[in-house]
Amino acid sequence: MEHQSYIISPETGWLLLAVLGVLWIVLGMYWGRKAKNMEGFMVAGRNVGLAFGAATAMATWVTSNTTMLAPQFALQLGIWGMIAYSTASFGLFLFAPLAKRIRRLMPFGFTSGDFIRLRYGRSTWFLFLVISIFYGFTWLVSMGMAGGILMNAIAGIPYELGMTVILLVCVVYTLFGGLYAVIGTDYIQSLIILVGIVIVGIGVLTQVNIDTIYTNVVNEKPMLMNALMPAAIMAIFNNMLFGLGEVFHSNVWWSRAFAMREEVGKKAYILSGFFWFPVPIAAGFIALTSSSLGINITSPDMVGPLVSAHVLGKAGAVIVFAVFFCSLASSIDSLLAATSDLITEDIYRKMINPRAGENLLRKVSGGIIIGLGLLSWAVCMPRIGTLATVLFFAGPMVGSTIWPIITGLFWKKANAKGALLGMLLGSSLGLIAYFQLGWYTASLIGAAVSMVTVLICTYFFPEDFEWKGLNEAHASVDKESMKVKSKV
């Protein structure tokens, strides 16, 4: 077994980091020129087409958590770990019909918070904002950590410096271009990610065959091949429900539903799900080759970049570096934009200053993007826990939002009591399970408790909601400008 070593020199790593950082800032600012008003900045003019829509959803979902946690799942949970992470694609598949309905019911909507406020009232809205903003920040922290881990593992760049640079780059171009910049850069990043993963997979298969991998795993870690491992089976359902909760509630995905043309949203999310599904399986397979290749893994969330760089050598490590950088940037920028929109629109505009004009809102949004970046940087500095433990802490909270969202969009009888109690009880009992049973149970319990609560409250306290109540025209929207849009 060889000890962990850097595949490329720190000097090469810094050069790659500088080139990629400048490239994304330039591209982000180029695409961001289209954001001439707040509607352009927040929802990209509501005219995103199929190619860009599918690419941005796929690239955003191929996060550092996919490229680093999927291998970690395989290393710790075996064959079911690979499948467990791939179930997150169900979130994209099942959000497809929701995206179509959201676009039709809320033609002038801006955030997921708009829906909760109009559908369930202020009390439920307040709780939802706490959950959604906390989740967004947790996801942001997990990816900031992943950036530092990646650059340290491959190039020996100190964790603190690598993490700082990736956050800074994403803050800069998101600040100037908003969702236009995010979607434009996501399109290119998605192409790089797909090509890079194919190259890594081919590289692994040229060095070790399937039979050797299987024999080595059976001899050294037989539990990883156990199809009845309880923790692994639980992780499948937990991860699937976590993925559903992430997509269904997060403003990252609602903002794209509002940004895509009405006939595009459903198709774009279905396509993105198909493109995303094999990625975690491929990444997980790579992890199972680590022992056969003689690589010493000192931390489970480092297994992906270490194996990939080892297999491809120094020249191939450049490709690996670019793939992981793109997977980080495509999600960090989306979170910065979506979370700042949620805070700007739902908290500042709706609660603090309803008369704020576009110039002021743009300044506030920019300040929030910078603030989110700085706060994430401060929390990432001590590197708390592994990526899985950090991210899945928010699992029961996002899981508790699934049923309030689904029933609120399709069931007139769904009511505020059920939504509020469902999110409150689901989050509380799910967090208890997180600490008492394990992170791989929290989302499952949170979603189950929320489902039962929503259904009981709907049965005993049915309402008769009018769908037209979701069609809220914002004062800042120039309806005449909806007739002519620049193509994205």
Image (cartoon, rainbow, N blue to C red):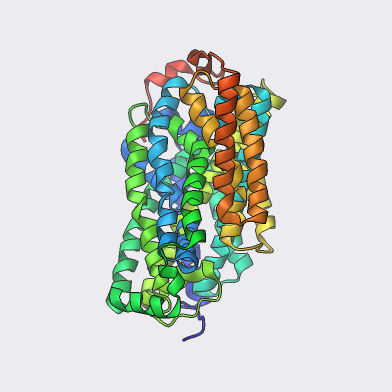
Q: How many marks?
A: 0
Which residue of the protein is positioned furthest toward the right in this rendering? 352
Is any part of residue 198 visible from this angle?
yes
Residue located 49% across and 57% down the image: 64
Left or right of 184? Residue 231 is: right
Give the side of residue 406 with respect to residue 433, left or right.
left
Residue at the image point whose x is 37% and y is 66% from the top: 285
Depicted 25 relative to depicted 149: above or below: above
Residue at horizontal 64 percent and vertical 24 percent from the top: 417
Vertical arrangement, residue 484 with respect to residue 82, above or below: above
Along the viewing direction, whichever of 362 and 94 lies nearer the viewer:
94
Quadrant placement of the C terminus: top left
x, y percent for residue 466: 51, 13
Look at 52% across and 60% down and name the residue there: 231
Residue 25 appears in the picture as rendered: no
Residue 131: give x, y in percent of width and height: 63, 39
Image location of residue 402, percent across then percent down = 52, 36
Which of 473 and 62 lies nearest the eye of the viewer?
Answer: 62
Res 435 → quadrant: bottom right
Residue 273 is drawn in which quadrant?
Answer: top left
Nearer to us in this view, 266 or 453? 453
Q: Position of residue 198 (x, y in %)?
A: 31, 62
